[in-house]
Amino acid sequence: MKKQNLYIAQKAVVFKKENNKVYLLLIKYKEAPKKNTFKVEGKYGCPGGKIQFGEKLDESLKRECLEETGILIEPQDPIGIISWQVEKEEEQNQIVAIFRLCLYKEGTLKNEVNENDTKLEGSYWMDISDFNIKNNLIGDEVAIIEKALDKIKN
């Protein structure tokens, strides 16, 4: 039997307004090196990652977002939660991700990802007026982003 692990992760839902447009911070996946319950290749998703043991929740999300995008954020309230499974040869992992609205603080997008990172293509500010959320986002992230958009409009 494969070893089973449960991980808790966080994802940042970050918007910024500029020149009368609203932009959403996203990362683009180039491949999924493991068997995953969601199709991620060529799709966009919110930046984030697993919480390290003993790490404070806000610090974890700030660290992950900065590592993946170069953007500094201020985490706010949770807006959604999803779970997925990833299989490796020797283990089966379940990840539970809490999505949190975040304020954009400052920073410039990274132009290139770490050469050792085989899963990410890059990070982007996507104009929500011409970005097709339903076709370009990873599976269950669509409903969370739509909920976040409704919240920021009000």
Image: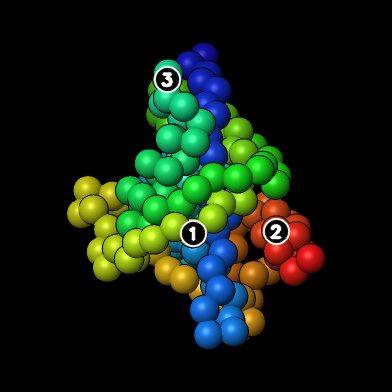
Sequence-earlier tag: 1 or 2 = 1
Q: Decide if residue 44 is in sight here.
A: no
SS class, disc 1: strand
Which of 135/131 is in front? 131
Quarter placement of the C terminus: bottom right
Circle 2 sits on which residue? 148
**Would residue 106 be seen by someone viewing this image from the given angle?**
yes
Circles 2 and 3: CB distance less than 8 Å? Answer: no
**Residue 92 at what x, y percent from top left?**
51, 26
**Camera-nearest label, 1 or 3:** 1
Number of residues whose C-alpha sits closer than 10 Å to that of mark 3, classed few (under 14), some (14–19) or many (20 or more):
few
Q: Is residue 146 left or right of residue 63?
A: right
According to the picture, the residue beneath numbered tag 1 turns out to be 104
Q: Amino acid at mark 1?
A: Tyr
Amino acid type shown at disc 2: Ala
Residue at disc 2, secondary structure: helix
For marks 1 and 2, give the CA distance. 14 Å
Residue 5 lies left or right of residue 151; in this view the side is left
Tell me if label 1 and label 2 are in contact, CB under 8 Å. no
